[in-house]
């Protein structure tokens, strides 16, 4: 094997493997170092398998309510292992596809754990303990992140879970307590509730989905509560101790402390970057708030060393990592690159029931900026397609600068909104104004008509409200 490359990437997740493919497309001699599975957490234990399992849970929900449409289903039998097997098969198919694409673009895949030795030099330790050295003109770190540890709560792989165990349960617990209500925690809460578990959701902030607009958060919490979930905000779990086949959790709220007994606990309170054992200290790599500090092209303060994705800072999203991977490779290859997308305008999607999708500023942040803004809100209960689907919950909310008509933010909660948010992303990228968006013709009947009505509503022109 040739041990010298133009580009060497450490980490084969959605940032690393996409960067490798783009480098291969550009004719660069490229190597990708991955210690476990191609596709990283996203394809194997994150984005993809969760969506497969959420799909199964939603099918179950539809079956339980099929009588509304004239279908008599009868008693529904469910086997959690069958759903897990389905999710694993989807992940495997995509992982195989990544391997095919890397081979197609002449990327050398190196199995092992990479570590920086000095500028342009990397050592890779294989599973059997052997070590091989490689050289590259450009080294990209794409090592991702892992669940953040919580004081007093130690995952044990049986009763106290991380996302890994939650995606691979031996049996369905009767009750589940989820710590953290960001996208990961909220999705697992929605999933296990639809599968028939008693779910308790605990959030330290004063709202679930803390990064979302308050109106969106309130709508999701209302629907979660209606579904029977118990939700505590402004609260924290001080300890979780296994007692037989149950877990005793000490919950602290503004009203005091109480003990909750559940079958399983899921820790979903954020993530931390994988920066250990990379050799960063020896090279003097600059850090920022625990992440690797980079510029808008992924460059660190060390010449020839780059970082992309979760390890380079928030927002920790797969599509942000892929975007950064392509941008980084094209820049180092000497291609012109456009101005970077603002982190605020990277779409945020949460696949709960109802779904959440957003980009840009929340209303609170927009008002805090000092701008004069216009706000438009349109409910799905006034949308014909939503009613036809039996999914009238939710709304679309738009924020515009009152003077320039610039789109400042868009927030959606409801059926399939994660498939629609891209429309607002395109509008922002093309610098469409409120007035120009008025003239877009939206097909009827579609859920997306609510987007147009919310745009019109910001100017008091909504037609069906």
Image: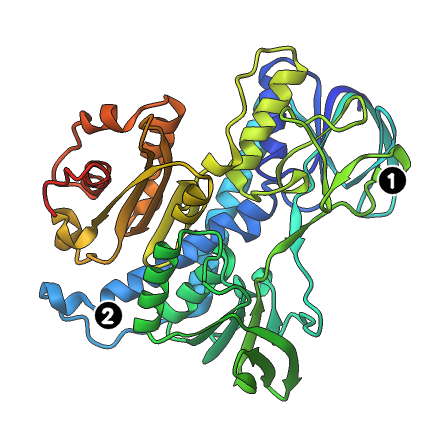
Q: Which mark is residue 195?
A: none
119 is higher (above) or lower (below) than 277: above
The earlier-in-sequence mark between 1 and 2 is 2
* Measured Cα–Cα span from mark 1 to mark 2: 56 Å
Residue 154, by quadrant, is bottom right
Q: Is residue 131 left or right of residue 320?
A: right
Q: Is residue 68 left or right of residue 134?
A: left
Where residue 441 sits: x, y (%)? 16, 28
178 is higher (above) or lower (below) than 322: below
Looking at the picture, tell me which residue is in the foreground, 355 or 87.
Answer: 355
> Could you classify mark 2 by the number of other residues whose Cα lies within 10 Å: few (under 14), some (14-19), or many (20 or more)?
some
Check disc 1 and report its element: helix, strand or loop.
Answer: helix
Nearer mark to the viewer, of 1 and 2: 1
At x 20%, y 51%, the residue is 380
Q: Is residue 115 left or right of residue 269?
A: right
Instruction: Answer whether labels 1 and 2 touch (C-beta < 8 Å).
Output: no
Q: How is the image coloured?
A: rainbow
Where residue 69 sits: x, y (%)? 11, 63
Looking at the picture, tell me which residue is in the foreground, 448 or 91.
Answer: 448
Residue 316, by quadrant, is top right
Residue 296, by quadrant, is top right
At x 40%, y 64%, the residue is 190
Looking at the picture, tell me which residue is in the foreground, 3 or 118.
Answer: 118
- Residue hosting label 1: 281
Q: Quadrant of the N terminus?
A: top right
Q: Which mark is residue 64?
A: 2
Where residue 114 sits: x, y (%)? 79, 38
> Could you classify mark 1 by the number of other residues whose Cα lies within 10 Å: few (under 14), some (14-19), or many (20 or more)?
few
């Amino acid at each position: 094997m040739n041990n010298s490359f133009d580009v060497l990437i450490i980490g084969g997740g959605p940032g690393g493997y996409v960067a490798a493919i783009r480098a291969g497309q550009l004719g660069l001699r490229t190597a990708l170092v991955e210690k476990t599975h191609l596709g990283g957490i996203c394809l194997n234990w994150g984005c993809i398998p969760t969506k497969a399992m959420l799909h199964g849970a939603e099918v179950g929900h539809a079956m339980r309510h099929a009588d509304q449409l004239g279908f008599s289903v009868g008693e529904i039998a469910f086997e959690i292992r069958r759903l897990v097997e389905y999710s694993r098969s989807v992940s495997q198919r995509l992982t195989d596809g990544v391997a095919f694409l890397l081979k197609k673009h002449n990327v050398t895949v190196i199995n092992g754990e990479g570590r920086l030795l000095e500028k342009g030099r990397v050592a890779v330790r294989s599973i059997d303990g052997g070590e091989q050295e490689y050289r590259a003109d450009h080294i990209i770190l794409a090592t991702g992140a892992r669940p953040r540890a919580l004081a007093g709560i130690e995952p044990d792989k049986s009763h106290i879970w991380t996302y890994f165990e939650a995606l691979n349960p031996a049996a369905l617990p009767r009750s589940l307590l989820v710590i953290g209500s960001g996208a990961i925690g909220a999705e697992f809460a929605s999933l296990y509730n639809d599968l028939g578990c008693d779910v308790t959701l605990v959030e330290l902030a004063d709202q679930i989905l803390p990064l979302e607009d308050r109106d969106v958060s309130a709508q999701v919490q209302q629907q979660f509560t209606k579904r029977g979930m118990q939700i505590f905000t402004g609260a924290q779990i001080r300890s979780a101790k296994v007692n037989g086949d149950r877990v005793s959790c000490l919950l602290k709220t503004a009203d005091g402390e109480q003990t909750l007994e559940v079958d399983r606990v899921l820790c979903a309170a954020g993530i931390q970057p994988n920066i250990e054992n990379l050799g960063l200290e020896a090279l003097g790599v600059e850090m920022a708030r625990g992440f690797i500090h980079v510029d808008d092209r992924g460059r660190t303060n060390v010449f020839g060393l780059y970082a992309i994705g979760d390890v380079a800072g928030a927002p920790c999203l797969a599509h942000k990592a892929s975007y950064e991977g392509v941008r980084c490779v094209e820049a180092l290859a000497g291609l012109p690159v456009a101005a970077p997308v603002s982190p605020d305008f990277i779409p945020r999607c949460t696949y709960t029931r109802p779904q959440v999708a957003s980009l840009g500023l929340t209303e609170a942040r927009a008002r805090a900026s000092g701008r004069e803004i216009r706000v438009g809100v349109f409910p799905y209960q006034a949308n014909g397609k939503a009613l036809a689907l039996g999914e009238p919950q939710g709304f679309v909310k738009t924020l515009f600068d009152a003077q320039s008509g610039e789109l400042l933010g868009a927030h959606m909660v409801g059926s399939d909104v994660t498939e629609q948010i891209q429309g607002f992303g395109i509008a922002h990228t093309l610098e469409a104004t409120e007035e120009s968006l008025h003239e877009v013709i939206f097909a009827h009947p579609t859920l997306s008509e609510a987007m147009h009505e919310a745009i019109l509503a910001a100017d008091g022109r909504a037609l069906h409200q």
